[in-house]
Amino acid sequence: MNISSISAALISGKQETNLAGPATIKFDFSLVKIESPLEYRGLGACLSKERRKVAENGLQHVTARKLGALYRSVLPEAPYLVKAYGARVSEIAESPAVKPGNSRDKGAFADFAGADGTSIWAAATSGRDAILTHLLACMLARMWSHQEATSIWHELVEARRKVLRTEAFDPVASAASQATLTRAQLADWDASARFWLQIADVAKLRTQKQVMLIIQDFGLVVNTKKNLYDSVLDAWTQALGAVDRLVQGIPQNVQSGAILLGLASWHLYPNILALWSSSNQVLAQNDSLIPNGGLLTLGVKSPSPTLPEGIFWSLP
């Protein structure tokens, strides 16, 4: 289904035009579901009935569609990353460490057994832009507390709405800018991504711990932008672009903490060359989803004693 078809199908009611103000278009963001990419179907098959229902027909689905519509005009395509991430989340959901046994043995908790991939499946059945928005949710959940991340989402939504009011008319984005996204919805969106990180960290324990130790040893700032919306958008798009190239087998040099934050949040593991290491040896992570050419080079560590360890990101 293409964007034009989706736009037409989403429209509910008529366009209301007011000579004193902008046109108002009403969309039903729960109406259209897109067939998930093939790579995500392993995850979908592992979800409990209740979680799948919420992801496909509940508020998580509506939240995913609205957020995707809000940001679709400013996000890179990142098709290779979208495919690789789907393969990785399906692999994790199907792993013995995560996949539940017989659901009948779970009793009253059967509907909530296994991986909480609700927001991922909601995004996968809502389109590429929603998947990329889920990836941001993972970055924010990795870096900030639940309360902080929810507040950041709230500010991002409000800031994006203001930007869209000044841009050329796009019916879907315009409708998303007028649609309600409550703080509770954004909190649920963050919570689902946060639960997923906990599950995925356990499933990829050894490799994830190795990456986190490298990041901890390499002090790096995400960016120094003073505006929250600009800072998050820059970090998000930078990470999406760089990791998409790594998945294609294109080597990347780390220029900011955004790329490392993305990798740590999305459980993708390129081979790493750390130039500060005396041996200058490549740390081979042997991730089947990243070709050998996708080498990540970390430059010389900053000698500044004021730079904290790990990734540093200060938002106003």
Image: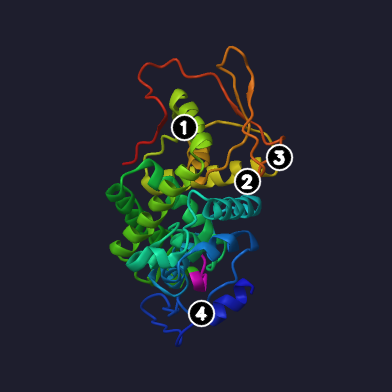
Mark 4 → mark 2, Cα distance in angstroms = 30 Å
- Give amino acid for label 3: Pro
Q: Secondary structure at mark 1?
A: helix
Give the x, y percent position of residue 157.
37, 59
Q: Answer with mark 4 or mark 3, whichever residue precedes in sequence.
A: 4
Give the x, y percent position of residue 255.
54, 31
Mark on residue 212?
Answer: 1
Give the x, y percent position of residue 115.
45, 56
Q: Secondary structure at mark 3?
A: loop
Quarter of the figure that contains the N terminus = bottom right
Region rendered in magenta: 167-172
Of 272 and 256, the residue lying toward us = 272
Tell whether label 3 touches label 4 (CB within 8 Å). Answer: no
Mark 3 → mark 2, Cα distance in angstroms = 12 Å
Give the x, y percent position of residue 58.
40, 73
Specify whether residue 170 is painted magenta: yes
Q: Residues within 10 Å of mark 4 (few under 14, many from 20)?
A: some
- Give amino acid for label 4: Leu
Q: Answer with mark 3 or mark 2, whichever residue precedes in sequence.
A: 2
